[in-house]
Image (cartoon, grey):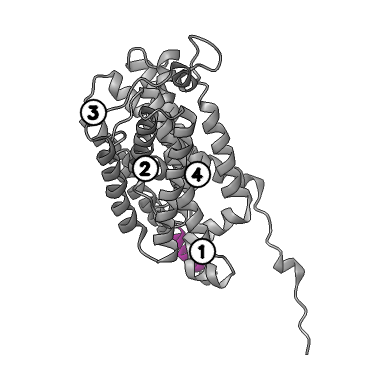
Amino acid sequence: MTTTLDPVRQTPKPRPAAQRWRSLLLGRDAAVIGLVALVWIAGSVFVDNFGKPNTVYFLLLDALPILLIAMPMTMVIISAEIDLSVASMLGLSSVVVGVLFQGGWPIWAAVAVALAVGLVGGALNGFLVATVGLPSLAVTVATLALFRGIAVGLLGTKAVTGFPDEHKDLVSDRLFGPGTAIPGILLVFVVLAIGFGVLLHFTPFGRATYAAGMSARTSRFSGVNVPAVKFWLFVATGFVSALAGVYWTLRYDSARGDNAAGFELAVVAAVLVGGVSIFGGRGAIPGVIAGALLIGELRAVLRLADVSADAINIATGVLLIVSVIVPRLVTGLHGRWRRARRSGLESTSSSD
C-alpha cells in the first residue's frame, strides 16, 4: 500500500499579517526600545543637561565597550553558554598594548599583538568548554582570574599613559564635526552589529547557534557540529573583548591592570535586558542593542543626577534581576491564560 502525503498539510502556513505585527509591536524587543525612549524623555525633562549633544556623545563613548562585547556575548548566551572573562580580557589586552608601547613597539604592532592575545584567550575558553566539555561558568570564572592576574602581574599598580594624540583622536573624533553628538568610532560598532546580525539571523551558523541553545543533543542528531559552533563563538568573544581593550586604552589614555574591573556585569545585563534567554535558544541582536543603550542611558542619567557609582551598580544589578524574572512570570501567566482559554472552549463545545 502506498501513502500519499498531503503537500498542503506539510507546508507550514505563514502567519497572518495582523499576527506578525502584533508579535512585533508587543514583543520583548519593542518593550526594551520603548523603555529606551521612556528613559530618554524622563532624563531630558528631569535631569539638567541630559539630551544635549555633548551628553549623547559621551553616553555613546561610554556605552561603546558594552555594545561591542554584547554582540558576540549574545550568540554565546543563545548557545546556552556564558563568558565571564570578557572584562579581564579587556584589561589584559589594554596592558599588552601599554607594555609593548612602553617598550618601543609601534602602536599598531602593539594593537595587533593585543588582538592576537584576545584570539588565544578566546580559543582557550572555547577549547575547555567545547572540546573538553567543562561548564562555561566554571571555565570563564577561572580565566577571569587568570587574565586579570596576568594583566596585574605585567604592570603591577602602574599605568602606561602618553599614547600618540593622533591615535587617541581616532576614538574621540566626532563623525560630523565639532559640537555634534555622534563619535566616529561608532562606525566600528555599526560594522560589527551588521556582521553579527547577519551571522546570527541569516546564516546556517546562526541557526546552529539557536539549535545548540535549545537542545545540544538534538542538534547533534540533526548534524550540527555543536563543539565547533561554541568554540568559534568563544574565539569571537575573546577577539572583540581585546578590541574593546584597545579602545579603552586609547580613549582614557591609560593602560592599567585593573581597567574595566567588574565590567562583565554590565555586558551580561545588557544582553539579558535585551531579551536573550539565560537558558539559551532565544534572543536577537536588535533587542540587545536596545538593552545596551538602556543601561548606558540609565548610567548617564544617574551620573548627571549625582548618584554614587555604588548606587549605579545596584541599579544595574536590579535591572539584571528584573530582566530574568519578568519574562518567566509573563511566560507562566500566558501559559495559564492559554490553558484556561482552551479549557473554556472545550467546556463550551461539550455543552453544545
Q: Earlier in the sequence, mark 4 or mark 2?
A: 4
- The reply to whether dot 1 and dot 3 touch (C-beta < 8 Å) is no
Residue 249 % position (x, y): 38, 28
Q: Is residue 166 magenta?
A: no
Q: Residue at the spot x=27%, y=19% of the render?
A: 305
Q: Earlier in the sequence, mark 3 or mark 4?
A: 4
Closer to the observer: label 4 or label 1? 1
Q: CA distance from mark 1 to mark 2?
A: 24 Å
Q: Earlier in the sequence, mark 3 or mark 2?
A: 2
Instruction: Name the amino acid type tagged 3.
Output: Ala
Mark 3 surroundings within 10 Å by alpha-carbon count, few (fewer than 14), some (14 through 19), many (20 or more): few
Which image quadrant is residue 125 in? bottom left
Residues shaded magenta? 338-348
Q: State the residue position of label 1.
A: 226
Instruction: Name the amino acid type tagged 2.
Output: Met
Residue 181 % position (x, y): 48, 16
Mainly helix, strand or loop, the magenta region?
helix
Q: State the residue position of label 3.
A: 309
Q: Inspect this view and state whether residue 35 appears.
A: no
Q: Quadrant of the N terminus?
A: bottom right
Q: Give the camera-side residue of 78 and 86.
A: 86
Q: Which mark is residue 85?
A: none
Q: CA distance from mark 4 to mark 1?
A: 29 Å
Q: State the residue position of label 4.
A: 27
Secondary structure at numbered mark 2: helix
Secondary structure at numbered mark 4: loop
Secondary structure at numbered mark 3: helix
Q: State the residue position of label 2.
A: 89
Left or right, 346 with respect to 21, comes to left
Q: CA distance from mark 3 to mark 4?
A: 32 Å
